[in-house]
């Protein structure tokens, strides 16, 4: 029995010895791990800038590795009649151009020279109205501006068939007095911008459609074709052909009153009023019977009365046949034109 107790004691001592060895190994490993962790911590805390740079490098590397997504370009689609304010502005523009109302036009454009005013008023003598007006817009070169492609049918006086046409307008950003249409010269950068927009297939389709309808209208109506051929370049030359220009430049050489076309443009209106004043104070003008067939020397309005303030009955074109019934000493003549009896300035008759 003593022997068994001795054996158990020896066995316990062996277990303790082995456990001490294991414990010693574990303690050593713990010490090593703690020392390594302490060293790494010290390395990081000693140079935080280095650690930050390393983090930034890691972030940059990760960013470079990620594929970059392309930034989509902003869309600039062609839109039809989607801006009510612009549609209304263009409607006014067409109205003022057709009527030759340059004073009203100055309220919606940025600049209007005297030369442009005269061209507009000369052109208005041939225009009755603009019909079927449609506005096609694209974004302009600056924020809240627009490039507007305006398509319309131009109704000419005394011609049944309308002439399709298209114009390009630049509408600036909305200001304190509203939007305005740019009417001055266009710089090179704007020309390039518009030229680029015109490469859009939808814009090209607009131009092609108007061009096709323009040709078809002339083929359909010989009167329209003849008129377009006749007035090509004539509007710009008309002021030089009118006899009143000479009268204004050399007033001492003539006592004739300004012609009807100049009076309607607002030029020489004071002279006309002075010339017509004797009509009211001295009674009716003396009439001389003519009863002859003649021709119109330049485009002129046929009026219901012998005054530029009366209703316009028709527009007689240069070279058209006309019957002169009577001539008056106030510079007017009673005529018959296309079955209508009216009055024109005598100076416009051969």
Image: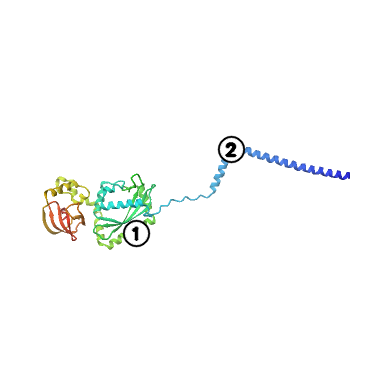
x and y, in percent, of residue 12 in the image: 82, 43
Which label sits on residue 125? none
Per the image, the residue denoted by label 2 is: 48
Residue 43 appears anywhere in the view: yes
Q: Secondary structure at mark 1?
A: helix
* Disc 1 residue crowd, few under 14, some 14–19, many 20+, Cα 10 Å: some
Gap between marks 2 and 1 measured at Cα? 71 Å
Image label count: 2
x and y, in percent, of residue 208 in the image: 34, 58
Q: Left or right: where does residue 324 sit relative to residue 194?
A: left
Q: Which of the image's four quarters has the N terminus?
A: top right
Q: Eyeballing the image, is 344 above or below 60? A: below
Per the image, the residue denoted by label 1 is: 209
Asked whether 303 or 251 is in front, the reply is 303
Which numbered disc flags the more N-terminal residue, 2 or 1? Answer: 2
Q: Secondary structure at mark 2?
A: helix
x and y, in percent, of residue 195 in the image: 36, 52
The residue positioned 70% from the left and 41% from the top of the image is 30
Q: Left or right: where does residue 9 sit relative to residue 308?
A: right
> Residue lying furthest bottom in this view?
220
Asked whether 150 or 308 is in front, the reply is 308
x and y, in percent, of residue 269 in the image: 19, 47
Asked whether 279 or 151 is in front, the reply is 279
Q: Are marks 2 and 1 in contact (CB under 8 Å)?
A: no
The residue positioned 25% from the left and 62% from the top of the image is 222
């Amino acid at each position: 029995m003593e022997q068994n107790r001795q054996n158990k004691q020896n066995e316990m001592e062996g277990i303790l010895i082995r456990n001490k060895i294991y414990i010693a190994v574990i303690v050593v490993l713990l010490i090593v791990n703690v020392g390594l962790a302490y060293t790494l911590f010290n390395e990081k805390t000693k140079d935080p800038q280095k650690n930050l740079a390393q983090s930034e490098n890691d972030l940059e590397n990760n960013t470079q590795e990620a594929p970059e997504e392309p930034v989509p370009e902003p869309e600039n689609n062609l839109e039809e009649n989607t801006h009510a304010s612009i549609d209304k502005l263009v409607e006014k523009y067409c109205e003022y151009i057709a009527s030759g109302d340059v004073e009203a036009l100055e309220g919606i454009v940025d600049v209007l020279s005297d030369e442009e005013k005269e061209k507009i008023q000369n052109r208005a003598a041939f225009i009755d109205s603009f019909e079927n007006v449609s506005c096609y817009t694209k974004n302009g070169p600056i924020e809240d501006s627009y490039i507007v492609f305006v398509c319309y049918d131009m109704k000419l006086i005394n011609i049944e068939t309308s002439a399709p046409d298209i114009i390009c307008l630049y509408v600036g950003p909305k200001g304190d007095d509203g939007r305005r249409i740019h009417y001055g010269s266009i710089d090179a950068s704007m020309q390039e911008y518009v030229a680029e927009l015109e490469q859009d297939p939808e814009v090209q389709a607009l131009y092609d459609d108007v061009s096709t309808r323009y040709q078809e209208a002339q083929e359909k109506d010989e009167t329209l074709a003849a008129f377009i051929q006749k007035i090509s370049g004539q509007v710009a030359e008309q002021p030089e052909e009118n006899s009143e220009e000479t009268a204004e430049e050399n007033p001492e050489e003539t006592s004739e009153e300004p012609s009807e076309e100049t009076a309607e443009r607002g030029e020489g209106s004071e002279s006309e009023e002075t010339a017509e004043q004797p009509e009211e104070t001295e009674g009716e003008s003396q009439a001389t019977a003519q009863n002859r067939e003649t021709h119109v020397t330049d485009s002129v309005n046929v009026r219901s009365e012998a005054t530029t303030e009366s209703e316009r009955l028709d527009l007689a074109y240069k070279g058209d046949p006309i019957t002169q019934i009577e001539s008056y000493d106030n510079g007017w003549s009673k005529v018959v034109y296309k079955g209508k009896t009216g009055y024109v300035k005598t100076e416009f008759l051969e």
